Amino acid sequence: MAVVLIIEDDVDVADTIQACINAAGYTSYWAETGERGLELCKQLEPDAVVLDLMLPGMNGFEVCTRVRRLALKTEPYILMLTARRGKTDELSGFDTGADDYITKPFDTDLLIARLRARLRRELYHADNAASADGALIQHQHLQLHQTHRWCSVRATPDDDWVDLVLSAVEFDLLAKLARQPGHVYLRSQLLDDIWGLDHSGDEHTTVDSCVKRLRKELRLKLRVPEGVNPLVKTVRGVGYKFEDAID
């Protein structure tokens, strides 16, 4: 799912944009200042940034310039918003690295259409690249190769990848969850798919024990304290899911 970062100091405008983006099926995050926006860019590596020009402190031009200087895996699409109308501002936006420009008040349908058109192209190219090696699962905090059976994690985009040491079933469990982020798997599903239909063990004991060992290794390599469950999340009374988060 594409990630869109909104950098906008007007709470009402930000709420409207975020609601539209979420309704369009994308994941959105909001930053009220340019400084916070840059922090989130480093953490999230978003696919797109909706950037207000008139921000307090660091303005949108400066934010745009700094985003383009970040060592991100892929360059985000930057859509700049402003209440000011004028060719000079538009040209300045493009000069600092913006991809597109919309003036306020704007039509939310137009904003979503611009985002959707660009993200559709980005996802098309990403899918083509991924098809060359469909066994590779890549997230912000986890990368895993299903054929070569290796996986590694990192706490932040600035960290080096650290290899996980997992048993065969721990690896298979993590790979299954990571293939479909957010999808909730019943314990019975995991037991059948990982251990096999003829496995005679109790689903709670078998699956929960495996998850417990997996989380211990994840906490160790991600350097998070006891009680924090990174990546593998419990859905109480149901089962487990993968979430690309370490807190």
Image: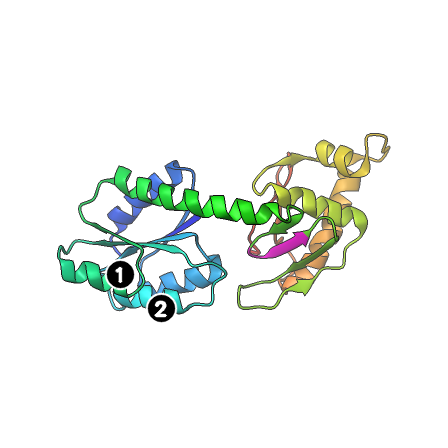
Q: Residues within 10 Å of mark 2 (few under 14, many from 20)?
A: some
The magenta segment: 140-144
Image quadrant where residue 226 sits: bottom right
Location of residue 23 with respect to 32 vertically, above or below = above
Q: Amino acid at mark 2?
A: Arg
Location of residue 155 with respect to 46 vertically, above or below = below
Quick one: 113 or 173, which is closer to the camera?
113
Quick one: 9 or 117, which is closer to the camera?
117
Residue 66 circle label: 2
Could one spot residue 1 in this view of the protein?
no
Residue at mark 1 to residue at mark 2: CA–CA distance: 14 Å
In the structure shown, which secondary structural element does the residue marked by tag 1 occupy? helix
Q: Is residue 105 magenta?
A: no
Most common SS among magenta residues: strand
Q: Residues within 10 Å of mark 1 (few under 14, many from 20)?
A: some
Q: Amino acid at mark 1?
A: Phe
Please provide percent x and percent y for residue 77: 37, 54
Q: Of circles 1 and 2, which is in front?
A: 1
Residue at 37% over, 61% down: 37
Residue at 58% over, 43% down: 181
In the structure shown, which secondary structural element does the residue marked by tag 2 occupy? helix
Quick one: 165 or 103, which is closer to the camera?
103
Residue at 74% over, 49% down: 147
Where does label 1 land, which residue?
A: 94
Residue 155 circle label: none
Q: How many marks?
A: 2
N-terminal label among 1 and 2: 2
Please provide percent x and percent y for residue 59: 25, 65
Image quadrant where residue 127 sits: top right
Please provide percent x and percent y for residue 10: 24, 53
Whether residue 182 sits left or right of residue 6 in the image: it is right
Quick one: 19 or 138, which is closer to the camera?
138
